[in-house]
Amino acid sequence: MPLEQKQPRIEPLDPPYNPEVSATLALLGPPIALFRVLARRPELARAIAAWGGYYLSAKSALQPRLREIVIDRTTALCGADYEWGVHIAVFADKVALTREHVRSLGEGRPSDACWADPAERAALRAVDELHSTNDLADETWAELVAATGADAALELVLVCGWYHAISFAVKALRLPLEPGTRPIGTS
C-alpha cells in the first residue's frame, strides 16, 4: 500500500536562491526539503547547522555507526519516515548497517541477534527507554556508560533528544519522502 503523500505545511524554497539562502544551504548540506524549509529562516538554519555539524564530525564522542544507530532508532520510534529515509539512504552503507540491522532498527528489539556488540545493544536499550519514559533508569545509565563511556552516553542522550525534535518537525511539516528514500519498515 503506497504512503499517502501530503502537501508540506511550509513549502521548501526552490531555486534560484538568493545569496544568503545559498550560503545557508551550503552549511546545511544537500538541498533536501527539510534544509530548504529551514533556509527560509537563515539564522535558525545556521544554528541547526552548527549543532548537526558537531555530531557529524570527528569531534563527537559517538562513533559514526553508533550515532546512526541512535538516529535511526529514534526516528523509527517517532514514526518519522522522512528523516529515517534520509539517514538510511545516506549513512546505512557508510556505517555497515546490514539489511537485518535496518529491519531491526525499524521494527525490532535491542535483543535481536544482529546486535552482538555490547555498546550497540546498550545504546538501543537506552534509546528505547528514553523514548518510552523520557528518562534512563540507573541500571540503563550504568550499562550505557560501561559500554560507551560517559562522554558518549551524554551525547547519546542529546542526539536522541535532538532527533525527537527533528522527527516532530518533519512530521508536523508533512515533508514527503526524498527521492530514492523509503519509509520505515520497507526494504
Image (cartoon, rainbow, N blue to C red):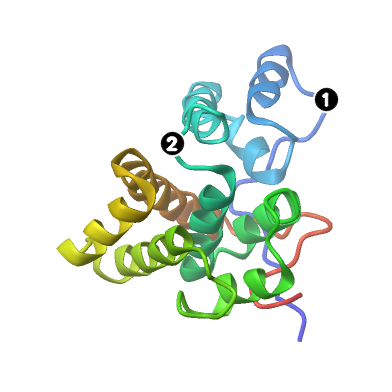
Q: Is residue 172 visible?
A: no
Instruction: Count up the numbered dots.
Output: 2
Left or right: 54 with respect to 144?
A: right
Secondary structure beneath dot 2 equals loop
Relative to 166, residue 112 above or below: below
Q: Where is mark 2, residue-wise?
A: 61
Q: What amino acid does circle 1 point to?
A: Pro
Q: Residues within 10 Å of mark 1 (few under 14, many from 20)?
A: few
Q: Residue at x 24, y 58 (%)?
A: 141
Secondary structure beneath dot 1 equals loop
Relative to 184, residue 161 above or below: above
Left or right: 5 with respect to 166?
A: right
Residue at the extreme left? 138
Q: Nearer the viewer, residue 155 or 114?
A: 114
Q: What amino acid does circle 2 point to?
A: Ala
Q: Residue at x 48, y 61 (%)?
A: 120
Question: Residue 92 at what x, y percent from top left?
Answer: 70, 56
Relative to 29, residue 108 above or below: below
Q: Residue at x 67, y 36 (%)?
A: 36
Q: Residues within 10 Å of mark 2 (few under 14, many from 20)?
A: many
Q: Where is mark 1, residue-wise?
A: 16
Question: Residue 103 at what x, y percent from top left?
Answer: 64, 76
